[in-house]
Image (tube, grey):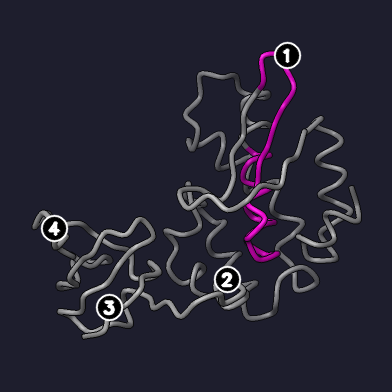
Amino acid sequence: MRKTLEKYLPERAVALCITLIKDHSVNLKIVNQRVTRHGDYRRLPDGSHKITVNASLNKYRFLITLIHEIAHLVAFEKFGRQIKPHGLEWKRTFQGLMLPFIHPDVFPNKVVPLVANHFRNPSASSDTDARLSLALKQYDEQLKENSYVFEIPIGSIFRIHNGKIFKKGNRKIKRYECSELATGKMYLFQPNAEVELIKD
């Protein structure tokens, strides 16, 4: 297990993650990328716990995702299955489990304050924290030339992961209003959403 996790996690996080996985009897599967989620937790019919995490994540996002999913397991075991998946019990559990990792030995110096700030009130997805998400994306392997919604000019045409095409509109508080070209429907996009700019 150690050799596998060393490929996916920051070096100084490996031992503690192995302890968490063993202590909570986690069956960890590292899977091919799913666009809609970074990871997943399920309690199997035999009572065992299965956690999947995308192999394509950079090591810092992989760590946050793994701990996010272990927090589901721990919160359900501690507080019962009737709690909300991303409710207060899960947030407190996630904070407690992440605390030992919020350190310059694990995260790059410039990322530590952003991680610390996010975990004052963690959300269901770190992607909704635009500053943290952009900081973490700097460590992704760049497979193709994508842009972020906030970078492209208003009126730009762009494509998202599922092939749908949009036109960028104005910013509404935190997100951008964009219209789908095929239907004219309006959608709100996070500023850090990765899109493929369609050039004229």
CA separation in Å, label 2 and label 4: 32 Å
Instruction: Give the label on residue 96, or none.
Output: none
Helix, strand or loop under label 2: helix
Q: Are marks 1 and 3 in contact (CB under 8 Å)?
A: no
Q: Is residue 50 magenta?
A: yes
What residue would you read off at disc 1?
Answer: 46
- Give the residue at x 68% y 37%: 51
Q: Which residue is mark 2?
A: 136
Q: Amino acid at mark 3?
A: Ile
- The span shown in magenta is 44-71
Instruction: Estimate the spatial distance between the alpha carbons at disc 1 and disc 3, rounded to whole Å.
Output: 49 Å
Q: Viewer-nearest of labels 1 and 3?
A: 3
Badge 2 amino acid:
Leu
Q: Which mark is residue 182?
A: 4
Q: Which residue is denoted by mark 3 in the rendering?
A: 198
| Kind of element beneath mark 3 | loop
